[in-house]
Amino acid sequence: MLLFQINSASHVPAYRQLMDQVKYYIASNALRPGDRLPSIREMARSLALNPTTIVKAYSELEHEGVIELQHGRGVFVRDGGAQGLSVAERAESLRPLIRQVAVEAAQLAAPADLVVRLLQEELDQMDRKEPSDESSGS
Amino acid sequence: MLLFQINSASHVPAYRQLMDQVKYYIASNALRPGDRLPSIREMARSLALNPTTIVKAYSELEHEGVIELQHGRGVFVRDGGAQGLSVAERAESLRPLIRQVAVEAAQLAAPADLVVRLLQEELDQMDRKEPSDESSGS
Amino acid sequence: MLLFQINSASHVPAYRQLMDQVKYYIASNALRPGDRLPSIREMARSLALNPTTIVKAYSELEHEGVIELQHGRGVFVRDGGAQGLSVAERAESLRPLIRQVAVEAAQLAAPADLVVRLLQEELDQMDRKEPSDESSGS
Amino acid sequence: MLLFQINSASHVPAYRQLMDQVKYYIASNALRPGDRLPSIREMARSLALNPTTIVKAYSELEHEGVIELQHGRGVFVRDGGAQGLSVAERAESLRPLIRQVAVEAAQLAAPADLVVRLLQEELDQMDRKEPSDESSGS
DNA sequence: GTGGTCTAGACCACT
DNA sequence: GTGGTCTAGACCACC
């Protein structure tokens, strides 16, 4: 069972924190296409949030094509679909966030190699579980 | 003259966009300690924003120690003071944003080497102009 | 054998999608009065839906006079009975949907002649097979 | 002042009715890029709906790129942006709705020329006010 | 059981 | 003033 949690002290709205966690679990292959997510009510109970807050998070994720809400059935992870992008398109999507990293690094006077090392670490966490065989685990 | 602009479609508040741009120009050495920023009135006119919005951005930047508001004189860039941090502290500050990059990259199915290359590019833009003399460049 | 399928990503309820497909096949003369439709159980199996969902679709279609459920025999297409309507009545029934087409076309900046051409195409697909004999076509 | 109204008897949810009306006014040039829409609270008052219902309608329209919500300022119509589509893309977007028209027409036994005439009427209502000069009117 | 819509009302953040 | 988030709770529709 995956762990979801929201930090109510953070100024990031709860529904956005939830969205980010779902995306994180998908990116790191802890959630895979076809997997079912906790129902709106379950999630609301376990996070001590109002169901409508979960509805908002799930709806936004659906708009972004990340998950699928099926009436009367539940909530499911969709399969990727971002394979058809060009290098330039991906670069343009990523650049603003990456520039923010560079700016923050400069302000902290963090050396470039440290920043790159941290990024490598995080990228490794995403990829490594990818097509490894599941059957040995369960 | 540096270019400031705000994107009203973005849901990042205007004052934050301004803050980010000031920080970006400082990080990339387009603004250096002692340099003067546009006055509140000037900035408000050129961005078509309410002066109180500029006041908010400048005040926050002052609280963060990035700039200095000198009553009746103008607004000036201070010299950075983040040298005393440990590697671990810098890493912890940067990790959340870097993880966000990794997650977004995974969602776009962007290969790790592309992401690292983009980061290198942005970091280079920060460092290269550092204590080199200005006149040769522009 | 006719192909029925439901799109779980669409927010149109499954029972409505089924109804629409039955109507489409009738309108395009792929199903004609007296033809037998798959039984509730067959349909439920082939669409991976709950039988009660098929029951709902078939019942609604029966209420609309489109099909006939014959206890223990099967499900059959009835012959259409909408001949007695005035032009004004038909126009009023169709206008809301047609206006929606016009609005969507405007939003896509689609030229009027393209929209009309598309409608002609679809109307042709309805009419052409009408009382022609089946064997020559398929 | 534009008239907005919702029909609470209809099974179309209120927020969707509002979305459709906004789109209709834009398609028929009664609302143009840059125009301001009633604020959430105004709209809620005038329609006797809860503000959160308006928020939902406006948010969806923003996701679709139709309008822009500006914090602290108001709600504004965005400029088109659908100019870059190919004929094939527009056709694929419009076909499902147009097919629905054809199916409904067939069920009503409405002759093709009537349906086409109705569509022409509605398309004319969209286009005619387009680049006509405004100054003579006001 | 599931998701989807709506209300009434509160509180916060932005301009 | 504006939009943005969240709650508590109701009612409906789908499977």
Image (spheres, coloured by chain):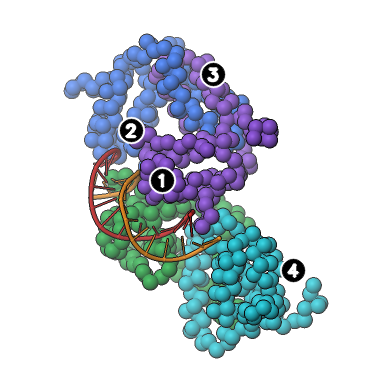
Chain colours: A green, B cyan, C blue, D purple, E orange, F red
Q: Which of marks 3 and 1 is nearer the N terminus?
A: 1
Report the Cα–Cα distance between label 1 and label 4.
Answer: 45 Å
Rendered position, B85 above or below B27: below
Report the Cα–Cα distance between label 3 and label 4.
Answer: 59 Å
Q: Which residue is drawn at 30% across and 64% down?
A: A47
* Pointer 2 chain: D
- Relative to the observer, which residue lies in front, B70 or D7? B70
- Give the amino acid type for the residue marked by disc 2 in the picture: Ala
State the mark number for residue D44.
1
Residues under numbered marks 3 and 1 in contact, where contact means CB atoms less than 8 Å apart: no
Report the Cα–Cα distance between label 2 and label 3.
Answer: 29 Å
- Give the amino acid type for the residue marked by disc 3 in the picture: Arg
Quick check: do tags 1 and 4 share a chain? no
- Give the amino acid type for the residue marked by disc 1 in the picture: Ala
* Pointer 1 chain: D
**Which part of the image, by quadrant, shows the N terminus of chain B?**
bottom right
Q: Residue A44 at x, y = what percent?
A: 29, 59
Quick check: do tags 1 and 2 share a chain? yes
Determine the residue located farthest toward the left in the rendered image.
C72
* Pointer 3 chain: D
- Give the amino acid type for the residue marked by disc 4 in the picture: Met
Quick check: do tags 2 and 3 share a chain? yes
Q: Which residue is drawn at 50% across and 19% down?
A: D115
Disc 2 element: loop
Report the Cα–Cα distance between label 3 and label 1.
Answer: 37 Å
State the mark number for residue D9.
2
**Structural crowding at the residue carrying mark 2, measured as other residues with C-alpha within 10 Å and reported as few (<14), some (14–19) or many (≥20):** few
Residues under numbered marks 1 and 4 in contact, where contact means CB atoms less than 8 Å apart: no
| Residue designated by label 3 | D117
State the mark number for residue B1.
4
